[in-house]
Amino acid sequence: MAAVLSCGKGAVLSHGSAAALWGLLRPVDGPVDVSAPSRNGRAKRRGIRLHRSASLGAVDREDVNTRGPLVTVRNRIPVTTVARTIEDVEGVLPPKLVRRATRQAELAGYRVGATKPRRTRSDLEDDFLSFCERQALPRPEVNVKIGRFEIDFVWRDRGVAVETGDFRYHRGNVAFEDDHARELELRRRGFAARRYTGQQLDEQPDLVAADLREVLAPEGVGARGEGR
């Protein structure tokens, strides 16, 4: 509140600080993010990261609850709405944190509008390969054709196959049946199949790594899949 008040009429908490206030991300040390109308707000102050935004408009603080979809009040602090907060952090915070904030907003029942950062297939591939490198796991083959399916990641010599995805890409009866058909085909060809979500890679990396190490261990699954 002190940071917002110090930035003058129409200023509101925004960006990463707003995400923390809404409970979408953990608070972090450092400057407080405040947005102010483009022609308002005071000079730069220590401990405050000031953003200029013409779309906020210069509106009296008393009317903050009626400023439409961009601004509201939480815990008596003027703050950008959840949808505007997600929009603001895109391109400012790492994509992983933007996705996390968006997921938290959706789980809490907030409307995030048209701005929904999605982890694309290429995002997941890059994230999973980086994950394997960080965890000192052997690098898998990528996008391997096994039977009639293209599998995301395969350790052919260990007989292990991994699919990655997020819920929004795997809902519905057709996708559900396809997932199970893939797993049946992999088992038939001697592969141990695993599926991990982007959220698990973000929030449970140690559990995912332990699961993979167990199945990749030479004394574990002894299958040697047919491959193609």
Image: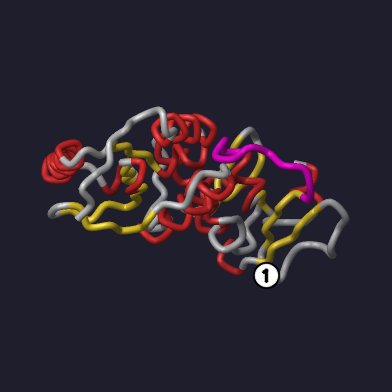
When the figure is inspected, residue 225 is found, relative to residue 9, above or below; the finding is above
Q: Nearer the viewer, residue 184 or 166?
A: 184
On screen, residue 129 versus residue 136, left or right, reads left
When the figure is inspected, residue 185 is found, relative to residue 215, above or below; the finding is below
Which portion, as a residue range, is magenta? 21-31
Q: Nearer the viewer, residue 210 or 188?
A: 188
On screen, residue 98 versus residue 49, left or right, reads left
> Residue 36: x percent and y percent?
69, 60
When the figure is inspected, residue 191 is found, relative to residue 60, above or below; the finding is above
On screen, residue 122 versus residue 93, left or right, reads left
The residue at the far right in this view is 46
Residue placed at 43% from the left, 58% from the top?
123
Q: Amino acid at mark 1?
A: Ser
Residue 168 visible from this viewpoint:
yes
Residue placed at 66% from the left, 65% from the top?
37
Question: Looking at the figure, which quarter contains the N terminus?
Answer: top right
Residue placed at 63% from the left, 33% from the top?
75
* Magenta stretch contains residue 29: yes
* Magenta stretch contains residue 28: yes
